[in-house]
Image: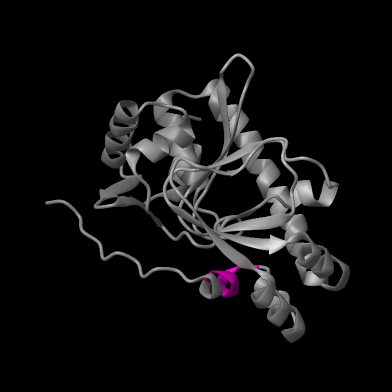
Amino acid sequence: MPHTSTPAPARTLQRMLRAAPWYAGLDDDERVRVECDVSERLVAGGAFVARRGGRVDHWMGVVEGLLKMSNVSPEGKLATFAGMPDGAWFGEGTLLKNEARRYDVIALRDTRVACMPRTTFEWLLERSIPFNRFLLDHLNERLGQFIAMVEYDRLLDPDARVARCLGSMVHPLLYPGNGDSLRIGQEELGNLAGVSRQRVNQALQRLENEGLLSIEYGGIRIVELEGLRRFGS
């Protein structure tokens, strides 16, 4: 009998901000400014949120949806760096270095994106020690994620790539909007792991048979997170 689940209520921008790990460390004045200054935009599935080489004027977060951070080489080879589900924030490195964006960000489904202006981001940097500590931890965790993705892209078979991709999407600092249930389709997962939808289906069946996850209506429930992260080692 297939698993069923009740759809989660729609996330509001305010709820997303207040659930962000960095928000709790702000003082009252900082929280008021953040909630006044952060805006929201809707990006249709398949459309660009941001393009490589473009000017970066905002720190961005995912209110609800799914984004892919990637690049295409001159030879046409696609490299996916990260998937960004609900609650993810990205682009702080480019803002800190004040350089053009080095990657494309594409919506894999209709996605609501939070946009914090550069001026607000820099204002928080100047006055909030907890915000700076969050950014330091966030950049460190993102670097570790990128190193792991290079490893599994080059060394692991498709089943392990799917497992590691799912494992990377459960992270309380990078993706606080995710629990142990991921709202992700097989085509979206294939896009992030760099394998076909058919191959994703085979991998998920194997991972479910090994007790690492459960395939549910509308998504995947993680049963053994560390097992997914180590799969194929």
Q: Is residue 196 magenta?
A: no
Work out whether 116 lies above or below 161.
Answer: below
Q: Position of residue 214 (x, y in %)?
A: 29, 49
Q: Main secondary structure of the magenta part?
A: helix
Q: Number of callouts in the render?
A: 0
Residue pictured at 60% horizontal, 68% vertical: 20
Left or right relative to 142: residue 14: left
Work out whether 31 lies above or below 204.
Answer: below
Instruction: Please provide the residue range marked out in magenta.
Output: 16-21
Query: Outermost residue, top direction?
Result: 75
Query: Outermost residue, right direction?
Result: 126
Left or right relative to 88: residue 122: right
Residue pictured at 47% horizontal, 54% vertical: 111
Residue 231 appears in the figure: no
Q: Position of residue 134 (x, y in %)?
A: 73, 63
Q: Position of residue 105 (x, y in %)?
A: 58, 42
Residue 185 appears in the figure: yes
